[in-house]
Structure formats: structure tokens, C-alpha cells
Amino acid sequence: MKNTITRRQFLKASGLVAAAGLMAGCGDSQSGAHGTEGASYNILYENQPATQNYLTAASDIEMYTGANCVDTLVEFNNKGVMREGLATNWTWDAETLTWTFTLREENWVDCTGTVVAPVTAQDFVDAMKYVLDPAHSASNVYLITGYIAGAEEYYHYWTYRASAESGIVDDKGTKYTMNGEDVVVTTADGKTETVAYVDFDTVGVKAVDDYTLQYTLTYDFPGFLSLLVYLPYEPAYGPLLEQTGDQFATSADTVYSCGAYYLSEYESLESWVMTKNPENYDADNVFIDEIRRTYVAEASTVGPEMVKRGEIDEAIIGGDILDDWLANEETKKLVSMDRPNTNYTFFYLFNFMPVAHDFGNWKIEGVDAQYEPENWLKAINNTNFRKAFLYGINNDVTLAVKAPEGYAGYKLYSVTPPSFCANADGVDYTKCGELGKLDIFYNEEKAKQYRDAAKKELTAAGCTFPIKVQVPYNPTTTDWDKSCQVLKQQLESVLGSDFINIMITEGPSDSFLSNVRRAGKYEFLQCNWGADYSDPETETDPFYQEEGSYGSRYCYLRTAVERGLVTGETADVIMSYMKQVEAAKQITGDINARYEAFANAEATLISNALCIPMSMSIPAYLATRLNYWEGQYASTGFSNKRIKGIHVLDHYVSMEEYEANRDAR
């Protein structure tokens, strides 16, 4: 039996009387022993999603409805093994660059669980057309335009056309006008280009019949199947898209579902309910009947207290209270962690473009003069200087700031995390090629040897000491400032404050990436990267640049060489990395050879200290009644957000049980 109360009663019981709204389940009846009939999962939320439109969603919280209420062509089990989803089989034709999928019979249901229509191949086609319409501002459109034949040309044409029809002149002075069905693009210097009309029929997605779907790619891309667990590749019921337009998925009755759950209730700043979909083909593996989220602005404060009383099933245990909870025997046994997000990694980078530079299409501001960017350029041209950092940084001390328990399991000696992907023989990518020979670098003796060699060489090059090392942080990111302080103390103690002077600076709260990393306003920076698909090529994105390309790569490696800021041995290593990546990209038929080639390139990047690995993303500390290790897992996409396959337990998971569940998965 489900026990529900009004939101007003819910908040009153929590000491937070507020405006009345929708219902929130609480009490022990929703959290019985796992597998109990009618179990529900109740949680608070304080960050309101900007949209429930899964086709255009950008943030994590906006992805939950799409992840749980709409099925994908393929999915993954709890060990990361791909299996059938809405597709029962698929084939690849290398000559035509075409994937063909056979769909199972599945239905769309509305917000009451009533069957509306069958899911057909045309629903995938209609959804992609919606995503490629610039009027909908889809955040992940690049996951289509980069891989589906004709998609980029179609999207660009209709983007230019929208600008022409709106009379928009961009910030570079470019104007867009119509000439019949064609768009004329006129730049500020008077140059013109005509972009011919592009019809959606030219895009490489096709419904062969109701249950046969085809995608034609731009090139032989081994990671394509992993893209299918991203939102822009999900289906949507075409007639509903046409009927609702930009109001699609703004409420429970404007979105249809074909997944494990359907969106049964949704009121902004009130509540958000997903109910088990009995029509789904895999309903027997859905063990929670209802997922109920209740909006509370103070959820991060209220949630832990409600956990103590057993009133909700999960709450984040923030850093402000974590130490107290771990020190208390009663609350310590309630604390575990979320399942790690293994596609997200952190690393340190040197800025190879620390001086102001005008690329024509945009400008880099560079580092302020007080941080001596010219002196910094001399330093980072020196391999021994960079290696002193590589061997001198002890990631244990910085990770302990965010993870007082268990941080050792998140340290990395590579950019790509373990269990991200494996070759055809099942060998983990991080064990392939030269990458497999790397290990944790921290070694004070070696760090001092590299420091001494660097000091001798840099003195001869005219470098002054101590070398200023400007290290910015984002003040809105919890504990980043503390991590920087620990880094300064630890690294200066190893290398000496007469060799380096780490100068920590507070970056802007808004648009940190644009104002700091992309503007070149740092010398040494903690960066992160989230993979886009399950293939090592994605891990090169922060570093690789095509010849003459000044794209917003993280540290402008190739640009610095082409502009003459980096020379000698360092320039040679950078160009070797670029060539290795280019060669690896060309290997598409032999996965083992492809992975080894990318692994060798990554090893070149790291062993020459062009990048210093730090860690995987450290998961949040939780009090939860869910065993997340039962749930779906994939190194990319939204699989980890799916609740299918997970039970609600009759107790909160301890750290010991969490580790046992992890080891038993």
C-alpha cells in the first residue's frame, strides 16, 4: 500500500511549512525489504530542471525523465555490457556506412499509462528532425551533426536561414539574407558565400518500414553504438511533436513514454512523479513502482535530517556535515556513496598560450603581467620543468579534501579512466600499448632530480626564479579553493618555494570556463573532461587540434607550436602526439590496433608531462536505500541515471555494504 501526504503536510512535518502543492510519499511503507510489491522511491530536489524536454536537455537533472521514461535502441547491463533495447538486432554495412536496426513492438503511453500508439522507426526520424531544428536550441545537437551524414549541412543551413529571417547580424558583423531558398552570408569585409537550400531528406536517418530504422554515418566511426544512449538519439511520437512544438514535454500531458516509467505528474517547483509502465517490454525487471521527487528549496539541509527519521529514501550528505556524520557511530552507518561516474576525469594542464593573441575570429586575453607570462613560457618549454610537476604532485592530499574515505580508488595515472572501454580481447584500454606501462608518478626523489635539471637549463635560458605559477579556481565549486591550497603547500614543499611560487587566484563565479580557460587566463589549472562516446578517440578532444585549427582546445598545444611560442623538444613531442592521434583515427577495422595506437598517443602526452592526470570524478556521499550497483552502467551516456533493475531496501546502505555490492556486481 502506498502512503501519500500533501506537500504542505510533508513540509510541516519537516519544520518547513510552505505553499501547498502535490503529494510526497514518506514513511516506512514505501521502503520495505527489496522487491516488496508497491515499493516507491522518495527523494527531495532543490534544483528545478529548466525543461523536461529530453530531446533538448542540457543538465544532469534534465536528463532523468528521458533516461527513465524513454527507451533507447540499445542499453547496458550493470556491468557495462551492451544488450538489446528497443532494437532486437542491428547490422553494419561498411561500404555504405549504414547501420540498420530492427525494432521490437513497443507502445507509447500517456501520463495515465494509457496506450496511445506503437513506437515506430518514424518516431526516431521525427525526433532527429526536431533536434536539428535550430529553433529548439538542442544542447547536444553536436552528437548528431558530427556523425550522421548530411546533418551538419542541414543544421547549418537552417541556422543561417533563421538568422536571415530574423534579420540577425552576429557579433562579427556577418549578415544573412535570403535569395529565393538560398541563404547569402556576407561577412563584415564584404565577402559573400551562398548556402544552398538543404532538405531533411538528405540527412542520414531513414524509416525503411515501421520496424526498420537506418542511420548513415559520415565516416566509419567505431563508437557510434555508444552514442545511442544519449538523449538526441531517443524517439519521440511525431504527431505529438507536431501538435506541441516548443511546448513539448513542458508538462506530464505533453510527453509520451515508452520506457520503464511514464511521467505521471509534473509541476514546476512542486513535485515530479514517474510511475512504472506496465506496457514496457521489460516491466518484470522494474522493481520500484513509483519514483517521487518533491521540491524543497532547502533540500540539502532538510534531506539529511529526514533520513535520520527514515522519512525519505535518499539524501546527499554534503561536505559541511560529512565529517560529523562519519564521526558519529549512528549516522556513520547510514553513509555510502553514489556509483562513480567513470566517464568524467580530472587532470592538470599547463597553459601554452599565456600571452594575448588575436586569431582573427576571436582573441585570447592571456595571463596578467604580474604573473610574468613570458617567464612562464620559457619554463613550460622545458620538459624537465614539467616533469618536476608530474612527479612532484601527490594526488592523495588533494583528493582527501573531497573524499575523506576511499579516495585512493579514484586516483589516475591516465586521462582515460579504467573500465571505460576494452579491446576485442577484453583488455582494458588503460592496459593497452605504452599506456599500460604507466603507473602512479608521485616520487619526491625523481621530482627533485627533474627540478635540479630544469633549474640549470632554465637559468641558462634567462628564466628568473621563483617561477610564478598562477592557479585559478571557481569559487562556486565546493572545496576547489581548499584543493588549491593543499596543492600549493604540498608541491612547494617538494620543489621548494625558491623554485616555484604558486599564486592562487579566485576566478569569476559566472562563465568561469569562458573567462579563464578559454581566455588563456591561467598558467596551471585543474581541468576536467567528460567523454562523449565509448571509444578512446573522445579522450583526445581536450588536446588534439587539426593543422591550422584554433578551436577551443584546453591548452592550445598545436597552436602554440604553429605560432612559434613553443619550440625545440617540446614542440617535437606535441607534434608527435598530433600525428599519433591522426594515425589512430584512421584505424577503424581493427579495434585492437586502434586502441593500441590511441593508448600510445595518450602515453606520449602524459609521459612528457603535457598533461598531469589527477582522478576520476569522486561520487557524492549519500544516505540511500538503493543499491546503485544493481543499475545500468555505461562509461558514457545516461545509463547510470536509470532506476530500472534497482530495488528499494529496508535500510540505508553502509559503506561496507556499498563496497560489498560493488565487488559482487
Image (tube, rainbow, N blue to C red):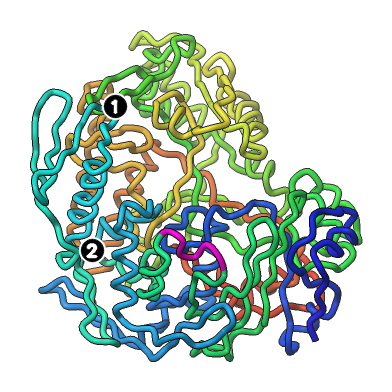
Q: Which residue is mark 1?
A: 362
Q: Nearer the viewer, residue 174 or 139?
A: 174
The secondary structure that dominates the magenta segment is loop
Label 2: which secondary element: loop
Is 130 placed above or below 383 here?
below
Is 455 placed above or below 90 here?
above
Seen at 20% across and 45% down, the residue is 579
* Residue 327 point in image, percent of width and height: 87, 51
Hey, what amino acid is under mark 1? Answer: Trp
Q: Which residue is mark 2?
A: 148
Residue 387 marker = none
Identify the image quadrant of residue 278: bottom right
Hey, what amino acid is under mark 2? Answer: Ile
136 left or right, relative to 309:
left
Identify the image quadrant of residue 240: bottom left
- Magenta part of the chain: 246-251
625 left or right, relative to 478:
right
Mark 1 to mark 2: distance in Å?
A: 29 Å
Q: Is residue 332 visible?
A: no
Q: Nearer the viewer, residue 517 or 610?
A: 517
Quarter of the rendering occupied by the N terminus: bottom right
504 left or right, relative to 24:
left
Seen at 25% across and 37% down, the residue is 167
Q: Is residue 278 visible?
A: yes
